[in-house]
Image: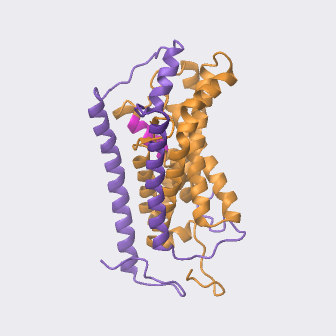
Chain colours: A orange, B purple
Amino acid sequence: MHIAEGFLPAAHCAVWYAASTPFVVHGARAAIRQVREHPENRLLLAAAGAFTFVLSALKMPSVTGSSSHPTGTGVGAVLFRPPVMAFLGTIVLLFQALLLAHGGITTLGANVFSMAIAGPWAGYGVYLLLRRIGSLDVAVFGAAFVADLVTYVVTSFQLAAAYPTPTFGAAVTKFMAVFAVTQVPLAIIEGLVSVILVRVLSSLATDELTGLGILTRPTAEEPTHA
Amino acid sequence: MPEQTPATVPSAPAPRTRPRAWVTWVLAAVVVVVFAASMVIARLNSPDTEFGGSDSAAVETLEADGVEPWFRPLFEPGSAEVESGLFALQAAIGAGIIGYALGALGARRRASGQTEPGQRNDELPER
């Protein structure tokens, strides 16, 4: 999903920077507020950010014969809401743009929009929906799967908007062929790994997750053993 | 947006249950299976596939359309070996932080030593 340095026209770079900046600024403030008001959640916040750091560094083979990497933004979006993830994701993308020549400074706005904003919000929406009908595991899987896939779909649209040759629709199809199909098995893997992480956290950080509204307090009627 | 709203999902909250360890291990096994299956399926479809990056594939698509980058990265790792090392460094930093956070959360939990009524405290295997 990293659009390479210099590959978006300057006008598009500016538009995506303008679109992303408010989300990132708001997200930075949300992250600072989270740390100030709930210092007990600092470890969880670090784990959520680090999860994105790890997953977005792992390139995995896919059925299409190319490889790609997950985004790891679903868990953070579920735990801390999407604005915080906009901030954490931007840090990861900045690191990759500056040190790995992966992505770029000119395309940072567009990449932030797909990976740190669109993906987390889509995943969080799916989480809220699935949480009403299913278990936490199912909701977390759905959130991570969708956050991952939507990121790459948005990248396809961004590239098609910049280079609508021969038509916008044909360009979307062209870039989706590169990104979306490749991403499906990776999104499944990301979903499963995210569920594993949340299961481990439910054991280790039960009180913190209850405070964040992820776990519910046991009531007298409900037996707590499964 | 309020950051702390325990009642975000008011309807039908699942009762808090202890995650069962064997399910977690099965999930981990499924990850390995999906990973391996992706690779095998790709190889069956095209035996000499090289698993090039999709980001690079997008760049090749753009270059085939005659798109020229108008800005160069400020720093480039130089070789694939150095680049993969830097990616490994990124994963290592992330994994280190996750490991520290999980360890510290576990230690905090053990130090508090308290179980809420009706809640079991045997999630952590003795080590």
Residue shown at the point (34%, 60%) measured from the top left: B99
Range of magenta residues: A88-96
Q: Is residue A199 visible?
A: yes
Which of the two residues, B32 or A173, is positioned nearer the viewer here? Answer: B32
A91 is within the stretch colored magenta:
yes
Residue shown at the point (32%, 55%) measured from the top left: B96
Number of marks in the rendered image: 0
B125 is within the stretch colored magenta:
no
Q: Quadrant of residue A94?
A: top left
Question: Taking B39 as reference, is A127 left or right?
Answer: right
**In x, y percent, where is residue B31?**
46, 55
With respect to residue B58, does A85 lie above or below? below
Q: Quadrant of residue A40?
A: bottom left
Which of the two residues, A92 or B67, is positioned nearer the viewer here? Answer: B67
**In x, y percent, where is residue A148?**
55, 45
**In x, y percent, where is residue A200?**
45, 67
Q: Quadrant of the C terminus of chain A?
A: bottom right
With respect to residue A87, does B3 lie above or below? below
Q: Is residue A20 visible?
A: no
Residue shown at the point (52%, 49%) measured from the top left: A73
With respect to residue A200, does B49 lie above or below? above
**In x, y percent, where is residue A16?**
58, 30
Which of the two residues, A19 or A170, is positioned nearer the viewer here? Answer: A170
Question: Which residue is at the far top?
Answer: B66
With respect to residue B11, does B94 lie above or below? above
Which of the two residues, B60 or A5, is positioned nearer the viewer here? Answer: B60
Question: Which residue is at the far right?
Answer: B11
Kindly report the secondary structure that dominates the magenta region of the rendered protein: helix
Residue shown at the point (58%, 76%) measured from the top left: B16
